[in-house]
Amino acid sequence: MKKQKDISGSFESMMHRLEEIVESLEGGTVPLEQSLILYEEGVSLSKQCIDKLRASEIKLKQLSKDIEGNFELFDTKQE
Amino acid sequence: MSNQKTFTVSELTKRIKGVLETSFTNVSVEGEISNFKRHSSGHLYFTLKDEGAQISAVMWRGRATNLFFTPQDGMKVIAGGKISLYEPQGKYQIDVFQLQPRGVGELQIAFERLKQKLAGEGLFESDHKKPLPEYPERIGIITSPTGAALQDMLNILNRRFPSLDVILNPVKVQGEGASSEIALAIKEFNKFGNIDVLIIGRGGGSLEDLWAFNEEIVARAIYHSKIPIISAVGHEIDFTIADFVADLRAPTPSAAAELVVKDKLDIFENIRNFCYTMEQDLGNTIQSRKEKIASLIASYSFNRPKDLIQQNAQRIDELDRHLDQVINYKINILHERSNSLGKRLESLNPESVLERGYSIIYRSQDIISRANKLKSGDDIRIRFHDGEKTAAVS
């Protein structure tokens, strides 16, 4: 499991990029070819965001320390 | 004097100790704390006093950990314990089993005092508050694992934004040791890292129940956290020191869950709007390019070449007409000349001679120009200007 968060793939960064694209397109100053590229990127980002939102349930874990003082995450049952 | 028994100091002290310690095995005393010290051993030393007197007090470590609050100088308390005498110094003191603030008012005073102190140190400055992530994906929660607050938060998080990892660091949220557990949990999360935002909190309760969140140790842990913290303690009306230091105060744990994530339905709606706007904008861009092209086609400069062609065509037409005129003129001249030539030719025509009364005589196809070429009986044709007649030579 990777510890470092993938910044480019975070929901936050995707939503912000999407907002950025919408703003650029709204300006109407972007050349047509660039507009088409931005539009495609925007559509693909919105699909990825919606996919993420389709998760059915949060994952609950508990932070604990092992004997050596290292952190561990335990799965916890949810009611 | 003489028949009185003389004690050694130790004997006398022992006697006093015996009297004191048997007479005051379980006393309750009300007084104000001063000279409060927490020894590194964990024992607490302080003085209880009122206007007329004072008494030393000690609270051993084992009992001190049972305190839900940290005693402060000036706090009026009710101490329960027994009197003991420390022989080496001949000092008596109260060995405190239980310590309670005299009333809620005392806690409120302590609250105000700590609040002022920490405010003075700048712990509540808005400059220090960290912005919360707009779309957190990993949320750390510091609360009781059995409390209703946790379930309330999980239910709301599940409903609003289920694409989440929630990591619980379970702690006691009231009673002895609660404040140090909470402070430690904050430090642990910071060491662990990889958490977007922390919620610390608990459900409602009395001021005593919530007191852990008014302790300095918690306030400082919140202040030093690198992870943004939402405090969510008790009900709407409850304000704690933690609320002032935290990056955001939520009125209740449920409210914290509402504040920390956006509702997925709203996000869906936003994304839908984004897509709609993008389509519109792209459509507009294409439309405006079309119009631009149309206006270019209609523009003067774009039509200049066509204009030149038209002008040249006109010039050609003009030249053409001119050429026609010249040619016609020439033709007319030639025509006139040919007319006059025609007249002159006409005058040379034999026909015109015939009109003047001359005739031509043919034998067969030959023209007879001499009389001696004809003999009697020859068939001849006489041509006049208006026709022919046949005749025989006599």
Image: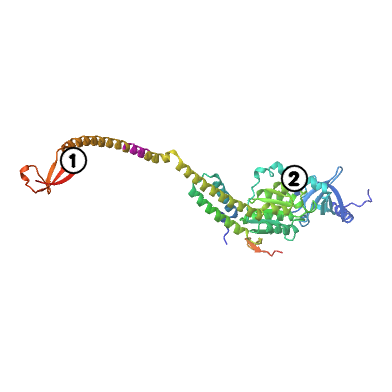
Q: Could you tell me residue B215's position as x and y percent?
A: 74, 50
Residue visible at 63% across and 55% down in the picture: B268
Q: Main secondary structure of the magenta part?
A: helix
In the rendered image, the quadrant that contains the C terminus of chain A is bottom right
Pick whichever of labels 1 and 2 is earlier in the sequence: 2
Residue beneath disc 1: B385
Q: Could you tell me residue B146's position as x and y percent?
A: 74, 61
In the rendered image of this protein, does residue B327 appear above or below residue A12?
above
Q: Quadrant of residue B154?
A: bottom right
Residue beneath disc 2: B114
Q: In which quarter of the image is residue B120?
A: top right
Residue visible at 28% across and 37% down in the picture: B328
- Residue placed most toward the observer, A75 or B35: A75
Label 1, label 2: how far apart the Cα atoms are: 155 Å
Q: Is mark 2 on a helix, strand or loop?
A: helix
Magenta part of the chain: B311-319
Farthest residue in the front direction? B394
- Residue placed most toward the observer, A59 or B210: A59
The mark found on residue B183 in the picture is none
In the rendered image, the quadrant that contains the N terminus of chain A is bottom right
Q: Is residue B58 left or right of residue B325?
A: right
Q: Is mark 1 on a helix, strand or loop?
A: loop
Task: Determine whether label 1 and label 2 are within 8 Å by CB.
Answer: no
- Check the residue under mark 1 and report the chain it is in: B
Q: Mark 1, residues whose alpha carbon is within 10 Å: few (<14), some, or many (≥20)?
A: some
Residue type at tag 1: His
Residue A16 in view, yes or no: no
- Check the residue under mark 2 and report the chain it is in: B
Q: Quadrant of residue B181?
A: bottom right
Disc 1 vs disc 2: which is toward the camera?
Answer: 1
